[in-house]
Image (cartoon, rainbow, N blue to C red):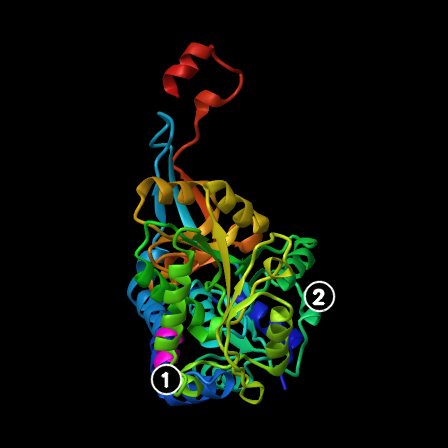
Amino acid sequence: MYNVKNVLRLQQHSFSNEKINLKKIINKLKKFKLALKRFDNEIYDSLKKDFNRTPFESYYSEIIHVQKELNYFIKNIKKLYKPKKIKNSFKTHGYTKNYIVKRPHGCILIMTPFSHPILFSLISIIGAFSSGNKVILKLSPYAGNTNIVIRKLINVVFSVEEVFVINDAQDNLTGLFDFNFDFVLFIGSQKIGKLVSEKFASRLIPTAILLGGKCPAIIDKTCDIKKSANTLTWAKLINAGQSSIAPDYFLIHESIYDAFLKETIKSIENQFPENTIDINLPCIVNENAFNRLVQLTKDQNIIYQKTHKPKLRKFFPTIIEVTNTKNELMKEEMYGPIFLFIKYSKFEDIEKWVKLNRCSNSIYCFSKDKTFYKKIENNFESNSFLLNDAAVQIYKQVQFGGVKNSGHGSFRFEHSYNMFTYNKTIIKAKKNMKFLFAPYKDLNSLKKKI
C-alpha cells in the first residue's frame, strides 16, 4: 500500500524528470470527462447517502461546475501556457527580449472540506494538474461514501505519480505538516486554516487558504421583499446551509423586518413543504454536527422552528432573532440551516455588525437605492459582492477565494492556473550594453540612451 512519504518521493522524481506535455494533459482531461460521466450514478448515490441530496441538487451544486472546469481547461490550456511578451521600459529596446512564463509549483497538497466534496476536490485537481503539478489530495473524512467514489474516479484517470488520494485511515491531518510540499491549498474552516498556514509558513512553503466566514445579507428598505426572501432562502438552504458561501446572518431594515420575516417563513414552507422535507432537505453531515446545531440554538430567541428529526439528521430551518453583538452565535459560522435575523435602523448599525468578523468571503446586498448599495460595496471588504442575488458566484467564470481573515488566494478557471503556477521572468540578451560599463561617461550621455 502506498503512503504519503513514498508517493511524495515518486511524485518529486516524476516532476524533476518530466517535461510538460500539453497533449498528454489534454488527453488526461478528456479521460477525466469520460470518467465523470461513467461515475455519474455512483456520485449521485454517494451524495444521497452522505447528505440525503436529491440528484437535482447534486447536479446544480457540484457536478455541473466540474464539467465546466474540464471544458475550460481543455479549450484554453494552450493559450494559458503561452509566454507573455514584456516590452523594454527604456530606450535599450533591441538589446533584450523579455517574457513572463508560468511554471508549476511542483508537488502540491490539497485539503478539501466535506460540504461539497465533488466540487472542491475535483476542480482543485483539474486546476493543479492542468498547470503541470503533481497532487496529493486529503479529503475530509466526514463524507465517507463520496470519498470512496472520488478515489475510484481519480484512480481510473491518473497514475499515483500524477494524483494520489489519501485513504481516510492512512494519515491524519497533523501528520501531513511534516512533509515538504511545494505548495499547499486548504479549503475549510478558519480554525484549521489558521493552523495549516502557521505550520507551513514556518518553512516558507507557500499556501492558499480559502475559508468561508460569516457572510452577511444586508436587506435594505427599498428591496423587493418577496424576491429577496425567496433568493436568500434558496441560498441559505443549499446543502442545508453547509456551504461556505451561504448567507450567515441577515441585517434587515427595521421598517420591513416583519414583512421580510413573514416572506421568509412563507418561502421556507413553499420551497420545502412539510410532506416533502424528508426528500428535498439535505441532512446534516453527521451526529456531532447535528448536536452542535442543537446546542447553538439552545436558550436563543427562536422566532420560527419546527420539530427536528435527529435519527435522520434533519435539522429544520430555524430563525433566531439576535439583538446583541456579544451573542455567541456571532462568533462562529452557522454551517447549518439557522437564519440569524438582526434589525438595523441606520448605516452605523450595519458597520457595527459586519465589522465584528472583519472580512467575509461574500457580502449579499438587496436594495434598489444606488447610493446605499454603493456604500455597502465600497465600505466593507470581501472576496465578492453580490447585488440582489446570493450564492451564484460559483456559477460564474469568476474567482473563488478569500481576503484577510476569510483566506488568501483564489481559484476557478484561469484563477486556478494563476494560483497553481508562479511567474518566471525570461530575459534574452542580443548583445551587452557597453555604455553602462565603467569607466563611466557623463550623465547626460546616459540619459539620452535611457
Q: Main secondary structure of the magenta part?
A: helix
- Vertical comparison of 59 with 77: above or below: below
Q: Residue at x 40, y 56 (%)?
A: 399
Among the 4 quarters of the image, the one containing residue 164: bottom right
- Disc 2, disc 1: CB below 8 Å? no
Q: Residue at x 65, y 72 (%)?
A: 295
Q: Is residue 376 magenta?
A: no
Q: Is residue 4 visible?
A: yes
Query: Dot 2: what SS?
Result: helix
Q: Residue at x 60, y 60 (%)?
A: 190
Q: Which mark is residue 55?
A: 1
Q: Position of residue 53 (x, y in %)?
A: 43, 83
The answer to whether residue 103 of the structure is visible from this angle is no
Q: Is residue 380 above or below residue 332?
A: above
Q: Nearer the viewer, residue 171 or 348?
A: 348
Q: Which residue is mark 2?
A: 178
Q: Is residue 125 left or right of residue 287?
A: left
Up-down relation of residue 207 to residue 65 (above or below): above
Q: Secondary structure at mark 1?
A: helix
Span of residues in magenta: 54-62
Mark 2 neighbour class, 10 Å CA radius: few under 14, some 14 to 19, many 20 or more: few
